[in-house]
Image (cartoon, rainbow, N blue to C red):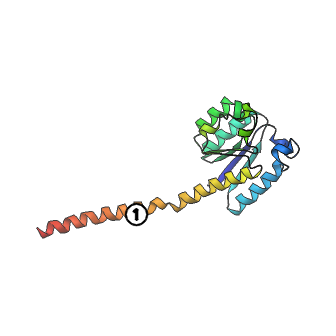
Amino acid sequence: MNAVHVLNGPNLNLLGTREPETYGFATLADIEARLSALCKSRGIILHFRQSNHEGDLVTWVQEAGRAGEPVILNAGAYSHTSIALYDAIKAAKTDVIEVHLSNIHSREDFRRQSLISPLARGVIVGFGALSYDLALEAFLARTEAADDRPHRKQIVKSISHAQKHPWQRRKREQKK
């Protein structure tokens, strides 16, 4: 993973002052600084953006998809309403982890349904600003697991067996 896109929807620019009993006291700048440090230490480019406009989020998801880069998405209220964002994620064919600062399942009924969740690689809710860190760690763990390629040993073993097999067959044929 060379880069990750962290996309934030409406009203997230108000973090730290908007309903801190629900969303916490961390600001969006605090979250960006923490993620930036984590990414920098691993040589990963962080694209961190926020918009109150649905079309911006759609465009940014499409950009991430074209680049083949994963997305950490807190779409805010658009999670529950945006078919355009749903369609953009589906078309982008890139990994998305949906995050929410609060536990949307313990809030009002209209917040309990996310249009994004069925398309997401995973969903992290209710851990406040830590939700973003957890999403980044999940992407990093998946990348590291892919780099370790535990299945590679099986592939090498299969290739070795295939290479041995013709030799063993020739040896049997020579004995006849």
User: Which residue is depicted at the point 71% across and 39% down?
Assistant: 105
Q: Residue furthest right?
A: 17
Q: Rate crowding at label 1 as few (under 14), some (14 to 19) or many (20 or more) other CA atoms within 10 Å.
A: few
Quadrant of the frame with the N terminus:
bottom right
Q: Is residue 34 left or right of residue 172?
A: right
Quadrant of the frame with the C terminus:
bottom left
Q: Residue furthest left?
A: 176
- Say what secondary structure mark 1 lies in: helix
Q: Residue furthest front?
A: 106
Residue 2 visible in this rendered orientation of the protein: no
Q: Where residue 64 sits: x, y (%)?
A: 65, 44
Q: Where residue 36 sits: x, y (%)?
A: 75, 56
> How many labels were placed on the picture?
1
Residue 60 visible in this rendered orientation of the protein: yes
User: Which residue is depicted at the point 53% across and 62% down?
Assistant: 148
Q: Quadrant of residue 18?
A: top right
Q: Is residue 12 left or right of residue 60?
A: right
Q: Where residue 104 sits: x, y (%)?
A: 73, 39
Q: Is residue 9 left or right of residue 118?
A: right
| Residue for badge 1 | 156
Q: Is residue 12 left or right of residue 62?
A: right
Q: Quadrant of residue 133?
A: bottom right
Three-letter code for the amino acid on which mark 1 is drawn: Val
Q: Where residue 44 sits: x, y (%)?
A: 67, 57
Q: Quadrant of residue 61?
A: top right
User: Which residue is depicted at the point 70% across and 58% down?
Assistant: 39
- Up-down relation of residue 63 to residue 38 (above or below): above
